[in-house]
Amino acid sequence: MSNERKDALKQRLDENYTAFIESLQGKTASELIAMAPEITAAQQLHEELLDACDDEDMEFLLRFDDPLEVVRGYWESEITGYDHSGEMGHMLWRIREDYQDEFEQQEAKPFGRDEIALDPVMDFSGREITGYFEIGFDVGRRFQVYPNVDDTCGLYARYDPMSQGFRAELCIKDGYDGRKRWVTVLLLPAEQEMVVDLMEESCQKVMGRSLRDAWADHHPAINRTNLHKKKSGRNQHER
């Protein structure tokens, strides 16, 4: 018997909802906006009311020609008639969490040349050229990294002269026992360009060579490969 009642109530709710939607035809945008709570209530009830009913509820609602309209007025007052500030506060917290990193990156202010100092002794031994910079800006504000008050913090820039790839790390040294921790950080394009330019200028001044040439001097295998390619290319051309 309950299945028959359920089928009958579903059919009546469907008919009521169709009639309600048809009644909205021809209304202006302003009228539809004003009716938004009614429309929302009708949609929710059409989708969920049947599953919330027991046998007695279904038997009662079937006494009405338009049970959707009867219940809609009550449901509208339920969803609009109490304070939603708690739910809204939680929603706003979720939005802040989702967008915080994006906005912080967009609002990041690039550090300037006067806020970093390059150690002229750079490391050319690896695949990347490594330069160490003393920093004079607030790493918490710029990178959202927060060392302890007594910690020392420096920036290591690693530049690949072959691919022109770039990466950067903060080295934070504990002020009490000297332990280090490394934090990968993302530099803005303008900061990356400035850091590589400073490394290039220092290399030209100290070694009289470009970064790429100075790095190649430390990697003779690269030179032999290049020489072999040049020789092969010349012989092929001569033939």
Image (cartoon, helix red, strand yellow):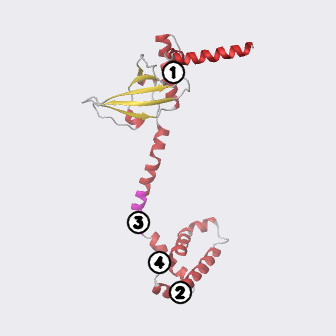
Q: Residue furthest left?
A: 176
The dominant secondary structure in magenta is helix
- Residue 171, compared with residue 89, is above or below; it is above
Mark 2 or 1, which is nearer the eye? 2
* Separation (CA) of disc 2 from disc 1: 79 Å
Estimate the x, y position of residue 221 in percent, counting from the top left. Answer: 53, 18
Position in image of residue 53 (x %, y %): 47, 81
Tell me residue 150's x, y (percent). Answer: 27, 30
The answer to whether mark 3 and mark 2 are in CB contact below 8 A is no
The foreground one among 231 and 82 is: 231
Q: What residue do we see at 48% from left, 75% from top?
A: 75
Residue range in magenta is 82-90
- What's the amino acid at mark 3? Asp
> Relative to the observer, which residue lies in front, 44 or 81?
44
Q: Which residue in the structure is indicated by mark 3?
A: 83
Q: Kindly report the distance in space between the C-alpha atoms of the residues bearing marks 4 and 3.
A: 24 Å
* In-image side of 223 versus 182 (left or right): right
Question: Of tags 1 and 3, which is closer to the observer?
Answer: 1
Give the mark nearer the N terminus: 2 vs 1: 2
Q: Earlier in the sequence, mark 1 or mark 4?
A: 4
The type of residue carrying mark 1 is: Asp
For residue 100, which numbered disc appears in the image? Answer: none
- Foreground mark, 4 or 3, reads 4
**Residue beneath disc 1:** 197
The answer to whether residue 24 is seen in the rendering is yes
Q: Does residue 70 sit above or below 110 in this rendering?
A: below
Cα distance in 3D space between marks 1 and 4: 68 Å
Q: Secondary structure at mark 3?
A: loop
Residue on which disc 4 sits: 52
Q: Which residue is mark 2?
A: 5
Lower sequence index among marks 4 and 3: 4
Residue 185 colored in magenta in the image? no
